[in-house]
Image: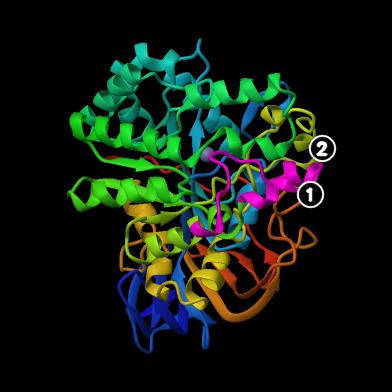
Amino acid sequence: MTYDLVIQNGTIITAEATYQADIGIRGERIAAIGEGLSGARVIDAAGRLVTPGAVDVHVHLSLNLGGGLVSSDDWFTGTRAAAFGGTTTIIDFVHPEADETLMQAYEQRRAEADPQTVIDYALHMALGPAQIPQLGLLPAVQKAAGITTYKLYMAYGYCLKDGELLQALEAIRDVGGLPVVHAENWDVITTLVNRRREAGLTEPRWFPRCRPALLEGEAAERLITLAEWVGLPVHIFHIGCREVVERVAAARARGLPVYGETCPQYLLLTEAAYETPGIQGALPVCAPPLRTEADQQVLWKALANDHLQLVTTDHCPFTMAQKARGLDDFSRIPGGVPSIEARFALLYTFGVRAGHFSPERWVDICCTTPARLHHLSRKGQIAVGFDADLVIFDPEKPARLSTDWLHENVDWTPYDGLDLRGWPVVTLQRGAVLAQDGQFYGQAGQGRYLARSV
Ligand SMILES: [Zn+2]
């Protein structure tokens, strides 16, 4: 029996095991895993690792903050950069306006994404205070749009008061969905921000001082308690501090379905970055803020021992000029850092090579658990019947990170000059080569929207 494409001689890494085998692909799916497979086309992966395509369930492409501020990667540049870095599926967001229905907002986001996206994608639906009257529509939205995950904010303009949070959690429970939550204590943050501004303390170094880790822990605890009482799983976004890790771990130890993610910026950068005067101190502004070296050690350990379950990017790039808008007032710096391209390789060098966890765990936290938790039924695994989304990863390939060659549409990276060993050399999506040896073979619009069900 011959296949359309065979990946030969590679070392397959899944969340469970590492082994030598060929992968036979027919059409868009994995059709066989075995020895001596033959195909119309063959890619030799000798000496390389073969992993599932990486899955990044937290990105912000073309995020419109209003006032002309839009995150600088659009659906084409962002998904192309993702493909170069081995990410073949993302989940972005629908942010409905107050006067829009959930379905109108969803259709508008599809209209932006569909013609541009290179890789497959799904969407979380954000539910703010203005959407509370529409909670009764969630079953219809799930059926029509295939949306099963919902973004809830305990911060910003979308910030839900506790009673609203309760109602949203109940509605999500009733459709069998998963809330993904930004957990911070917004009332305390705004109070501290105003106090600093009134005192003239407006440089970027004051930004983290308005978002204390202890209060982030309080918000996470409140969320976990509400979710326990309502009775549904919850995924806590972008965890960067011990205070939240401890609460996630304690909840899980009690058997609660609480899931925690962290991101490369929390694993690799610290709050010392904000102390640099001028634009350099403004660039790494993201929320929650970067924390301490001690927190980093807690995060690496938590990924290894399953106190945290996944790594996403929260990719939300703004250019130096966009960041400079807030130089004289840290509260006006658009928040977010880029890493959609380097996440998978960063976690290999600094996670696997540094000895924090195994190659299997690397695949689990970057590919398999994100896909499974977010109802992406044919993604994140190397198994017969799954989409042939695969990465051939050269574990020895050196890469010094630089905007000179990274494909993200932004003129800085917090990882400039960082030396990695290990980088994807081939990225396949549904059996087609998207990127190989630094060349791009995809095209705008070839990615598909993934309608999900629970
Ligand atoms: Zn985010």
Up-down relation of residue 375 to residue 190 (above or below): below
- Seen at 74% across and 28% down, the residue is 329
**Residue matched to label 2:** 321
The quarter of the image holding the N terminus is bottom left
Which quarter of the rendering shows the C terminus?
Answer: top left
Residue 183's x, y, as percent? 42, 35
Mark sitting earlier along the chain (1/2): 2
Q: Amino acid at mark 1?
A: Asp
- Considering depth in this image, is 452 or 345 the residue closer to the camera? 345
Horizontal side of residue 244 vs 190, given as left or right: left
The local crowd at label 1, few if under 14, some if 14 to 19, many if 20 or more residues have their Cα within 10 Å, is some
Q: Is residue 342 left or right of residue 45?
A: right
Q: Amino acid at mark 2?
A: Ala
Q: Position of residue 192 (x, y in %)?
A: 57, 25
Looking at the picture, tell me which residue is in the foreground, 268 or 410. Answer: 268
Please give the count of numbered marks on the rendered protein: 2
Question: In x, y percent, where is residue 378?
Answer: 35, 55
Residue on which disc 1 sits: 411
Query: Label 1's element?
Result: loop
**Does the stretch in magenta take in 289?**
yes
**At 69% across and 45% down in the image, what residue appears?**
274
Residue 122 is drawn in which quadrant? top left
Q: Which residues are magenta?
A: 271-294
Q: x, y (%) of residue 452? A: 34, 41
